[in-house]
Image (cartoon, helix red, strand yellow):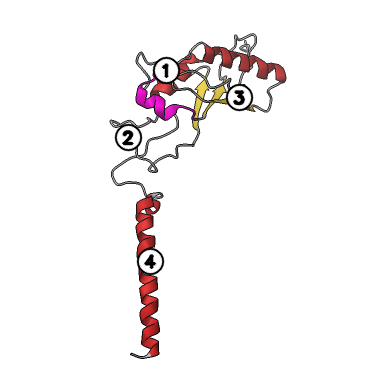
Amino acid sequence: MSRRTWVAFILAAIVLPAKASFALDTQRSGASQISRPLSGIKPSGLRDGRSFCNSIRYGPCVPRAGYLLGDPMHLTVLSKPDQKDAASYVRPDRDLNTLDDLFMALRACWTPPPPDEASEGAEISVRFSLKRDGGLIGPPRIIYTGDRATKEIRDTYFKSITASLDGCVPFAFTKGFSNAIVGRPITIRYVDNRPLRPAIP
């Protein structure tokens, strides 16, 4: 056997097992599946009106198919919701088991400042996390206020937000949902869309 043939044989013996090992590691880690949704399964959502691990509406909760565990959850709460959305501002009369349930409870909690202390169009966003028992992990933290919000407006709305949340917690979670929700950051954007300015005669 010539020297060239021996070199080709040795190279093949080294390269082929390495490729096979890399392919096996990729398959085991699921790296090839991360960016490709699973066929026939709609991802669970993190935003308004979409359920968490809801097997009836959006299919089972599948890791990597829809969200990453550390992603924050976002919710907008209006002081005066549209009539068509009124049902989503009613607190469920059962243990909370989905994001829809939690978002409904959080919307129902909101009590805006009285009109004489409020500011039309005011916006303030806060972030907090929940414990397994449904209580707050520390006080909410302000992460955004509207451009026209003065310190007085900011303080007024933050006082209403903390009072509203304190009056609602602890939430009653199912065991499975409490394990999924614990410690995850929740961001709520409160918008005071009430017509507070005096009507022009």
Quadrant containing the C terminus is: top right
In front of the other: 87 or 15:
15
- Labelled disc at residue 147: none
The type of residue carrying mark 2 is Tyr
Quadrant for residue 91, please give it. Answer: top left
In front of the other: 14 or 190:
14
- The residue indicated by pointer 3 is 141
Q: Is residue 108 left or right of residue 196?
A: left
N-terminal label among 2 and 3? 2
Q: Mark 1 and mark 4: span between their CA atoms? A: 58 Å
**Which residue is at 40% across, 40% downward?**
66
N-terminal label among 3 and 4? 4
The stretch of residues the image draws in magenta is: 173-184
N-terminal label among 2 and 1? 2
- The residue indicated by pointer 4 is 19
In front of the other: 133 or 63:
133
**Which residue is at 58% across, 26% downward?**
125
Secondary element at tag 1: helix
> x%, y% of residue 137?
53, 22
- The residue indicated by pointer 2 is 58
Q: Is residue 169 left or right of residue 174?
A: right
Secondary element at tag 2: loop
> x%, y% of residue 83?
43, 18
Q: Mark 3 and mark 4: span between their CA atoms? A: 50 Å
The type of residue carrying mark 1 is Ala
N-terminal label among 3 and 1? 1
